[in-house]
Amino acid sequence: MTTETTTQATAPLLGRGNRKQARRNALIGWSFILPNFLGFLAFTLIPVLAAFALSFMEWDSFSAPKWVGLENFQRMLGSDSFWIALRNTLLYALGHVPLTMGLALVLAMLLNRKLKGIGFFRVAIFFPYITSLVAVAVVWNMLFSPETGPINQFLQTVGVANPPGWTSSSDWALPAVIITSVWRDMGYYMILYLAGLQAVPAELYEAAEVDGANAWQRFWNVTIPSLRPTTFFVLVMLTVSSFKVFDLIVVMTDGGPGRSTTVLSQLIYQEGIGEGKFGYSSAISLVLFLIVLTVTVLQFKIQQRRER
Amino acid sequence: MKRRTLTAIALALSAGFGLSACAGAAGPADNAGAQDGKTTLSVSVWNYEGTPEFKALFDAYEAANPGINIEPVDILADDYPQKVTTMLAGGDTTDVLTMKNVIDYSRYANNGQLQEINDVVDTVGKDKLAGIDAFDLDGKYFAAPYRQDFWLLYYNKDMFKAAGIADPTDLTWDQYADIAKKLSTTKDGKKVYGTYQHTWRSVVQAISAAQNDADQNSGEYGFMKDQYNTALDLQTSGATLPYGTAKSQKTSYRTMFETGQAAMMPMGTWYIAGILEAKKAGKTDVNWGLAPMPQKTADGEITTFGSPTAFAVNKNAKHSDEAKKFIQWAAGAEGAKAISAIGVVPALQDASVTEAYFTLDGMATDELSKKAFSPDKTALEMPVSDKSAATDTILNQEHDLIMVGEKSVDDAITEMDKRVKKEVLNQ
Amino acid sequence: MTNMAEKLKAEAPLLGTELTTGRRGPGSPQKSGRLRHKTREQKSRTINIVVYGVLVVLVFALLVPFFWMISSSLKENNQVLTVPIQWIPQEFVWSNYTEIWTRIPMMGYLQNSLYLAVIITCLQVLTGSLAAYGFSKVRFPGRDVLFLAYIGTIAVPWQAYMVPQYIMMQQLGLTNSFTSLILLQAFGAFGVFLMRQYYMTIPDELCEAARIDGLSEYGIWARVILPLSKPALASLALLTFVNTWNDYMGPFIYLTSNRLWTVQLGLRSFVGQFDAEYAMIMTGSVISVVPILIIFLIGQRYFIQGIATSGMKG
């Protein structure tokens, strides 16, 4: 697995191929990484590995763990709840990732300019992310209310005869949650894009303009390629956070109606700390981890191919 | 510029770490350890500020036992069991653990996290403690209940009077539904509902299990059918706030009752303390009364459901003996007196305690309220079993589907049977 | 310190073009013929008006729940969750804002939150940007595998490993202290990943030039890379601060003593076993947004000034 550094820019360091130099490089590299790595190893990596090990055991958090092999995985594959949660998680990610990413980018472009009061607008767009989740849930549920909500009233005036039931319907609860979460998260990712946009050299725009490129071409040929590292970051973080979504769903629908919006991390929480089946919940999280890892590696490869 | 920033960061960090030695700005440091030779007994509680019964108990106990200093371990009510589970997994040494519900009790007790306290239970008297049966695990008791909440019907006396309807004595569910429909009107452009059935599944499921003498872990849920039909009928006829709205708007049952938006409300006895407090603070002027829960048939027998709250001794407790002494006191007459003084229903059943309860300032004192207060039978809200947690999840999900109208009662009950049998009972 | 970067650019004129900045994007005035300049300005003015229009509508849509939050914070508790929703309080209960300071030790909670958020943010930014340099500008065996391990752990939900983590902390005797939370949250992979991706956009030729100039790797990091990555540092600091400030589950599990509680825990203490005081919760939520606002208004300035201050005028 190589990162894009190899294809992208990394310039050869002094005297590459020289063994002594290589060792020096490793030392230097590690010295940069070490302060963070020590903390990461001790307090994140080891517990994560412990959790993975638990997925092959039965453990109630009180007595000693008991080795059960693949039993947890077998149980998982035979459980409807798991498949439903997996389906919901995937659907959620499919809706949430592209929408949030697109909107975040558009917003960042809009806000990356010197305007009077731009600070206010940037803050305002970040606001959904810092608004109390209860407020978000109550207000959006009101907006989505099937009979009296403004959204359905609007849909009826534009001629939709049978507007959806949103959060009180099994089919529409997930889209409703996705809409709310996109609304909430786009400001967060906008910040990341805004930072990324600062690294796009203005000269590239000027050069493109001299070549007669219109705004769209400039966007497509200058902005997008320059933002590639940021986009990769946003994409991975968004994918990961979509697969881990928890708080918003708990507050907004609590997985309902029925199981129509239950997601994997809810299942992990419920089975683990809720019912004390930590082995089983670890098994689910191992699967979640593998899915996300696959998706990330895929994104990585695609990105590398584009650069070639 | 850069150097300045770095210096600032370094300064902030060193200042920060320096501070962390005396960190914690939200109160005085824990005075752990012996203070004036006192023994410090730690007790896990939820929402200490908002649950006055704990303070009432602790203050009274400290006054009666000068050698003891009780230190509450305050945990948020929302995720109390999760935190206690995590703490116990880490080998926590809190002396007394409060059992929020019997499901957690069975989990901790079956896993050997609690000490057996048969002698405590025997001293207080098994026959006197309501809900004690729930704690019986093969003849062993690992906790003693000090509080017992059960369900009854709150009603708005003024609204009944205005509509010329007699107080709800000995109602059947059909009579209850009829009255609810009659009381539903529109007042000042605002809808007033005859009753408010909160979104919890117990409002339908636990009461029907209690009155049909059925087991919610059985995997057979046909007994719930009538109760669901009543609930749906109330909803479609506009006699109660629709479930979908109530759930998505996180409707507060207190708001519904205290602002006069609902004339009746089945709810637990814990709300008595809440409504007393609200009236005292002048936040509501509702003229309230208590009535027994509606029944299947009008045979004069009152069956309802409830759940006890109990204290247990941690296996790793530092002061086991003191902990047991405290529990014996709290579950006994002294503890019952302390909590009933603030409107909380003690587990100890004793005529003098009930009498004292009805002398509380602001309490509804009519005969019906008193009658409501002594049901003939109080079933357990959810059985004590290691299956209960998983069953609870399934029953919740299907309850949701019925109440929003996604599934017919029959289909959902079939699904409950199937899922509980497969996922919980492994049949 | 910024001079260093400028000097380097002057030394490497070819790179100059890539590194100089100014304001960019459509609508920013550029140097060119006077006539063109004028039409350009008109055009940018119309664009600005359109942008304003879009933004105003958008902001309204984004702030509705926040408005509800403020309105609820001015109500009696039993007036908050009414059906139908009530946008303007019947009577304004301003006393919520005075009461909350005595109902719970709000000031202390704010201090605790601030303390945690500042320390964690500083450590995250510092160690994250250091490690990111190692991951992006120094080449050594095993680097990429290690980096993948970092990204990988982000994908594991905390719910899955919080109990093993807690047991470990308990054995180290660190539970119920700020230290435990700081150790857990300050070394996350998020900062490393974010900073690394930003460093990838900084041309390596610049580091190379600095090396030729005799700077050590640490010197390059401190004097060349850091000044150039202000926008990324600002966004990392901002997002870490907000996430720490709003974190609930972490402090809930690790901070038991009431005196250590953060604002988010304090607000949840208004949630009882059977009901909740939403008026107070909303009041507290409004108050807890203020520090974030201040941090944001300071931080967002870097999104325009970022490289501009360190670049040469074009």
Image: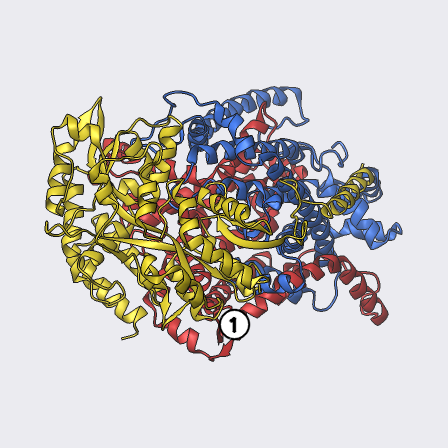
Q: Where is residue C190 in the image (x, y as percent from the top left)?
A: 61, 53
Q: Position of residue C142 (x, y in %)?
A: 70, 68
| Callout 1: chain | A
Quadrant location of the C terminus of chain A in the rendered image: bottom right
Amino acid marked by disc 1: Leu
Which image quadrant is residue C172 in?
bottom right
Q: Where is residue B158 in the image (x, y as percent from the top left)?
A: 21, 27
Judged left or right of residue A165, residue C122 is right
Judged left or right of residue A228, residue B236 is left
Which image quadrant is residue B167 in?
top left
Q: Where is residue B406 in the image (x, y as percent from the top left)?
A: 21, 51
Q: Name the residue: 57% across, 69% down.
A: A50
* Chain A representation colour: red
> Between B421 and C231, which is closer to the camera in this rendering?
B421
Q: Does dot 1 land on a helix, a strand or a loop?
A: helix
Q: Residues within 10 Å of mark 1 (few under 14, many from 20)?
A: many
* Chain C representation colour: blue
Q: Is C172 rendered above or below residue B153? A: below
Chain letter for the yellow part: B
> Between A25 and C168, which is closer to the camera in this rendering?
C168
Residue bearing the label numbered 1 = A54
Quadrant location of the N terminus of chain A in the rendered image: bottom right
